Amino acid sequence: MQSTLESGGSVGSGHLARAWAALQMPLIATGAGLAITTVLLFTMGVNPLDVYAALLRGALGSLYGVSSTLRWATPLILAGVAVTVGFKAGLFNAGLSGQIYLGGFVGSLIGFGVLLPTGLHPVVAILGGGLAGAFWALIPALLRRYLGASEIVTSLMLWYVAIGISDFLVRQFFRDPTSAAFLMSVKVAPSAILSSFFPVGNVSLMLFAAIALALLMSRLMSNAKIGYEIRMTGANPAFAYYAGVPTGKRMILAFCASGFIAGMIGASESLGINQRFVSQFDPGFGFDGFLVALLASGSLAGCIPAGLFLGILKAGGMEIERTLGVSKSIIWILQGSIILFVSAYNLRSYLRRFVAALKPR
């Protein structure tokens, strides 16, 4: 009995230790980022407490603020998952925004060009946008696999190609004739609209889909054979190859999965927020996804709280600008500071391992 209790206690303490190890880096980085931002606000003659109070008030202080936080958190969670899936295979999907953009176009195209029942239409459109993103990710994945080209460069360049193709097709064939100032497509069919379930704002069921996908991918990477092979490919591709893992196929699969999730983001934005394709609709979810992934410390489930945290920053930024007259770019400074310290924290661990390897045994 006593040994059982001791075993249970050790297991519980082990879980706590792992949880603290996962939270330590993002907490330290966030604290350091807040410290830098506080010093900057003092030099501007602004009370930091007023700024942070306005931030929380704008993000959580009202029903509309909560809905705004959840609205931003939905694509941010998905973007973090997309980036992390690539990281697991040792890949850097720098062209996430291009896959989001193409997914938004294809999702809206299915939304206004196909007739389907109300419950099925948005699902098909989002999956279609995901397939478009997966196809766009397949190109740099194949170039990396068979020609050794850097997926960072090729995926990033394809971002601009995706923008050009989508804008051209909308301008030539699908443009709303009433939109003179902005380039946008015709509106999607009512059956394809992702309606909000929240009393105010625009919070669609994609929020639950994003959370479910993060948990599902976390379990898949941890417990499934294919997830283990992807992680082994990213950690040590040479060892994985000689162990019999089809490293090329797993790398391509992970990159396409990352693109598929990115395409879902674009399609859900077109169907829910804009209800049509709008040129330059992506406010930077691709780059925000890297911050979410860094804050989550490589944990797919950790993308959920990290996405919510960044959602709070985005939702509260407008309140800071509206009530205090302080530019919301202060939020960008905070995000940049957090990225800096996350990178520095990881760099410290790498330096420790490097120094340890140099010591005589």
Image (spheres, helix red, strand yellow):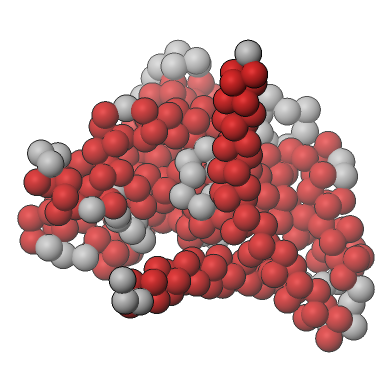
Quadrant in which residue 42 is drawn: bottom right
Residue 128 in sight: yes
In this picture, is 278 found above or below 151?
Answer: above
Query: Which residue is drawn at the image coordinates 63% and 13% (left, top)?
Result: 1
Q: Position of residue 259 (x, y in %)?
A: 33, 45
Query: Which residue is drawn at the image coordinates 50% and 72% (left, top)?
Result: 348
Residue 262 in sight: no
Q: Position of residue 8 (x, y in %)?
A: 61, 24
Query: Which residue is drawn at the image coordinates 36% and 28% (left, top)?
Result: 223
Quadrant in which residue 229 is drawn: top left
Q: Position of residue 44 (x, y in %)?
A: 84, 84
Quadrant in which residue 24 is drawn: bottom right
Q: Left or right: 65 with respect to 152?
A: right
Query: Which residue is drawn at the image coordinates 71% and 44% (left, top)?
Result: 69
Q: Residue furthest bottom?
A: 43
**Depth order, front residue of 318/138:** 138
Q: Left or right: 247 with respect to 349?
A: left
